[in-house]
Amino acid sequence: MFGFDPLVLAIIALAAIATGGIAYGLLYSQIEAEKKTASRINRVKAAETDHAKVKAARDRVQEISKRRKSVQDSLKELERKQHERQKKAASTSLKSRLNQAGLSATPSQFYTFSAIFGVVIAVFAFVAGLPPLALIGVTFAAGLGLPRWLVNFLIKRRQKKFLNEFPNSLDVMVRSIKSGLPLNDALRLIASEGQEPVKTEFRRVVESQQVGLSVPEACQRMMITMPLQEINFFSIVIAIQSQAGGNLSEALSNLSRVLRDRKKMKAKVNALSMEAKASAVIIGALPFIVALLVYLTSPQYIMILFTDSRGHLILAASGVWMSIGIMVMRNMINFDI
């Protein structure tokens, strides 16, 4: 075994430490420079990455802004066209109203029927012995008022049937588009397999495409024969999708859900306002019921209203005030949704 002198070991250790310190002192500046260089390079790379991210984010924001502006411009244009269509709808011709009612009669046939019906009612009224003034009023109401009321009744009934079936048709379109069918084929599917009156309206859309109109224009023309806000929503969705793109099936699915919610809200409002409507009907009919009962019990007591000029003035003033009251109650219980 060889022995080592502790003094020699201490000298060797001190020499190694001194050599390491001298080497660190000499290389410290180079090591720090390399660290600073590496740190600067990392900062530059991070800055470039951040700049690229910022630029990509800015590009996305600009793209979203452009798309939003395009959608806003489309909505403004559609709103302008819709306003023009509403102006035209305000002066709807008799032919358009007959089409809205689902009738195949022409305006001349309608006027002929109205005249014949008015003459028949006038003959019955004359045979019944009505006075001349009442005879003129009954003839006028039968010849002009009743047929037009019947057309309005048929229009409202047809629109109600359309609203009941329209969301189901939209659901069929959504499933068709999700399965891979294009929009034109989905419209043809509703036009051939749908329920009336949705089937007829979509058939007109398909026929409009066959004569050269685009799908958005054909859908907008549906407002002529079915002037409803729901049709306006549908045409706006189709027009925006054709101009700005997007998921049409999702948009139609959302529209179907909105239409069902509107229907539920209308039913809820009708249920809540039914008591007020019943009260309004009772209050409006009460004067006529009381007058009829008084006439049946004491006719000489109430006939002075019809034979004396002062009674005529009282009846006229009562009619005016009754009309004002009925209009006020009607506005109070009718709500637009």
Image: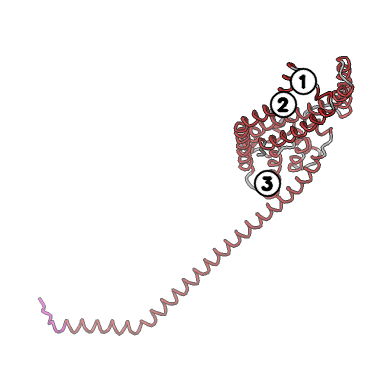
Residue 44 percent across, percent down from the top left: 50, 72
Q: Separation of disc 2 and disc 3 at Cα?
A: 56 Å
> How many numbered callouts?
3
Does dot 1 land on a helix, a strand or a loop? Answer: helix
- Seen from the viewer's position, the closer of residues 41 and 93 is 93
Residue 49 percent across, percent down from the top left: 52, 66
**Callout 1, which amino acid?**
Tyr
The residue range painted magenta reads 1-8
Q: Earlier in the sequence, mark 2 or mark 3?
A: 3
Q: Separation of disc 1 and disc 3 at Cα?
A: 71 Å
Look at the image and tell me in which quarter the C terminus lies: top right
Count residues near mark 3 (Cα–Cα under 10 Å), then give few for <14, some for 14-19, many for 20+.
Answer: some
Q: Nearer the viewer, mark 1 or mark 2?
A: 1
Is there a contact, CB below 8 Å, between mark 1 and mark 3? no
The residue beneath circle 2 is 287
Look at the image and tell me in which quarter the N terminus lies: bottom left
Count residues near mark 1 (Cα–Cα under 10 Å), then give few for <14, some for 14-19, many for 20+.
Answer: few
Q: In terms of image quadrants, where is residue 140?
A: top right
The residue beneath circle 1 is 301
- Seen from the viewer's position, the closer of residues 327 and 107 is 327
Residue at 60%, 59% in the rendered image: 61
Is there a contact, CB below 8 Å, between mark 2 and mark 3? no
**Callout 2, which amino acid?**
Pro
102 in relation to 123, above or below: below
Q: In terms of image quadrants, where is residue 293?
A: top right
